[in-house]
Image (cartoon, rainbow, N blue to C red):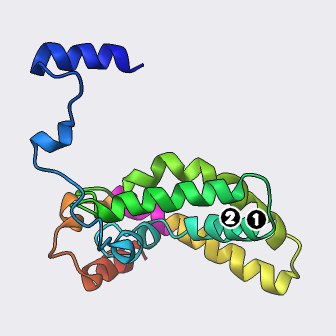
Amino acid sequence: LWVPQSFYWHAVTGKWFVFTYGYKGEHFDHVTDPHFGGVLWSVRNGWFVYSPLVLLGLVGLFLQARSKVHGARTTLLILVLVLYGYAAWWCWWLGGAYGHRGFVEYLTLLAVPMAWCLERIGTWRPLARVPLLLLIMLVVVVNLNLAMRYEWHWSEPGWTWSRLAAEWAALF
């Protein structure tokens, strides 16, 4: 898999391996001070802010890891390492990335834990289950509608919670 790429790099740059981000001055700037909170909760593309349904999958994953379900701890480790990588990157908000696009590839790892949680919720009494399922549906609708309304300036420093709240209000 690496051989064709290495030959291309060598033909173009004279080097067998090229860190292409280095040419643009992009690097891991926050290795000792990663922006975990920003990656997860920032108004500038925070994963949980724009994709809150993943919290359900993470709850399921934590419960499965605690119960020693096969593969759950490995999956949790993978997600923690990916989170650290993004949090240590110089552009931890990933530029114009609605809801931290970098996690898209890893959403499949949360599918089974999320289904496991939904299965558990399905066994609850209707008085507890129905409001939670309605909240989940509301979160999905808000997420999809915000994704359709997304504009690049949402990831700029001037994007604030009050401006996001105005977008939420416009949905209703």
SS class of the residue under badge 2? Answer: helix
Q: Which residues are magenta?
A: 142-148
The N terminus sits in image quarter:
top left
Drawn side of residue 39 relative to residue 123, left or right? left
Seen from the viewer's position, the closer of residues 13 and 146 is 13
> In the image, residue 45 lies at what x, y percent?
33, 66
How dense is the environment of label 2, judged by Cα within 10 Å: few (below 14), some, or many (20 and up)? Answer: many
Drawn side of residue 164 relative to residue 80, left or right? left
Residue named by callout 1: 64
**Residue that appears at 42% across and 71% down:** 40
Seen from the viewer's position, the closer of residues 109 and 43 is 109
**Residue that appears at 22% across and 15% down:** 8
Above or below, 42 relative to 150: below
> In the image, residue 69 lies at what x, y percent?
80, 59
Above or below, 16 relative to 123: above
Give the prevailing secondary structure in the magenta stretch.
helix
Drawn side of residue 101 relative to residue 107, left or right? left
SS class of the residue under badge 1? Answer: helix
Quadrant assignment, res 129: bottom right
> In the image, residue 20 lies at what x, y percent?
19, 36
Report the amino acid beneath label 1. Gln
How dense is the environment of label 1, judged by Cα within 10 Å: few (below 14), some, or many (20 and up)? Answer: many
**Residue that appears at 27% across and 57% down:** 94
**Residue that appears at 35% across and 15% down:** 3
Seen from the viewer's position, the closer of residues 171 and 1 is 1
Quadrant assignment, res 145: bottom left
Residue at mark 1 to residue at mark 2: CA–CA distance: 5 Å
Residue named by callout 2: 61
Report the amino acid beneath label 2. Leu
For the residues bearing labels 1 and 2, Cβ distance under 8 angstroms: yes
Residue 93: say if magenta. Answer: no
